[in-house]
Image (cartoon, grey):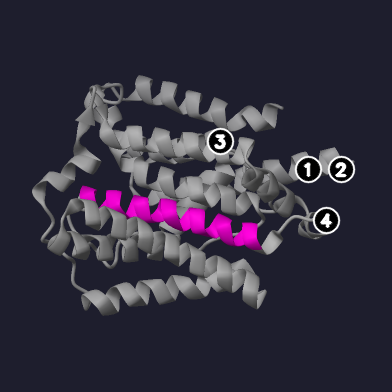
Amino acid sequence: MIQRLLPFFTLVALFVILCIVSPNFLTVTNLSSVVRQTAVINIMALGMTVVIISGGIDLSVGSILALAGLLGAMTMEKYGIAWGLAAGVAIGTLSGLGNGLMITSLRVNPFIVTLGTMGIYRGLALIISKGLPVHEIPASYSYLAEGSLLGVPFVLWILLVAAAAMHVTLEHTRLGRYAFSIGSNPDAAYYAGVPVRFHTTAVYAIAGLLTGLAGMIEASRLMTGQPTAGQGYELTAIAAVVIGGGSLRGGEGSVLGTLVGAFIMGLLANGSDLVGTNPYWQQVIIGAVIILAVTFDELRKRRTAA
């Protein structure tokens, strides 16, 4: 139980420490900045959560984000904001669906398939754009990432809705129950009558949908469609799930834990900036936290098995 609550204790402790060491931390401006900066990773990590719970992995989400954001921005140039948003989310969904179909049809390890599509989707973004960003985005589109509603960053409302929807999906739907079953023991799930191929494909499509949404938020934040956006985001999203208590072996994970994991990394990055820490150390710290999180998970499982 203590190990399961460790991410929450870590987040609270980190928050208190930053309040003490930096007078600029506990301000509306700074906290709003943390929320806006971590929203994209948070939404991507929600999709990664269901993938990891099902026993899979998706290394292509950073590339999907770039492709969705780019094509959404290009659509927005010609047809307006609504069509651009729809196009970005649709591209993300189709990309995730492609991952799922290849994994289930070719019966190739998800690591290998998504490693390949990571290059394919990134390459397509660069080919379509010729390596150049898309700038002609309506000025009002910046509201998606930078606007506020009822004094709260608008992007936080989007995150809360996405998190609530994912929580309901995991805890109260057949898809969620089957995802846990497949991640715990795919063979047992198959013999129990679970449509493993269908639900595995659906899981990757959901991850793609959320990544497409994150790509459009990133385009709003940058006010460009960048074919190079999202580089390294896949590892950050995976780290958020693992730090939040998800298991890379599958069968474990939660929406709340993932949000906590993402905000831990967001606070580490923000706190490092406030206290003037070398930004390169952020990568070292996050890497160490990931190793510790996985180590605690392994120790817990060994004790349970014993």
Say whether disc 2 or disc 3 marks the residue closer to the N-terminus: 3
**Cβ–Cβ below 8 Å for labels 3 and 1?**
no
Asked if residue 302 lies left or right of residue 164, the reply is right
Say whether disc 3 or disc 4 marks the residue closer to the N-terminus: 3
Per the rendering, the mark at residue 305 is 2
Task: Look at mark 1 in the image and give the residue it sits on.
Answer: 301
Q: Nearer the viewer, mark 2 or mark 3?
A: 3
Identify residue type, mark 1. Lys
> Where in the figure is residue 210, as x and y percent of width and height?
42, 51
Would you call the spot at circle 3 few (<14 residues within 10 Å), some (14-19), or many (20 or more)? few
Task: Look at mark 4 in the image and give the residue it sits on.
Answer: 188
Instruction: Find residue 88 and report its image quarter.
Output: bottom left
Marks 2 and 1, how far apart at CA: 6 Å
Per the rendering, the mark at residue 196 is none
Marks 2 and 4, how far apart at CA: 19 Å
In percent of the image, x 78 and y 54: which residue is there? 189
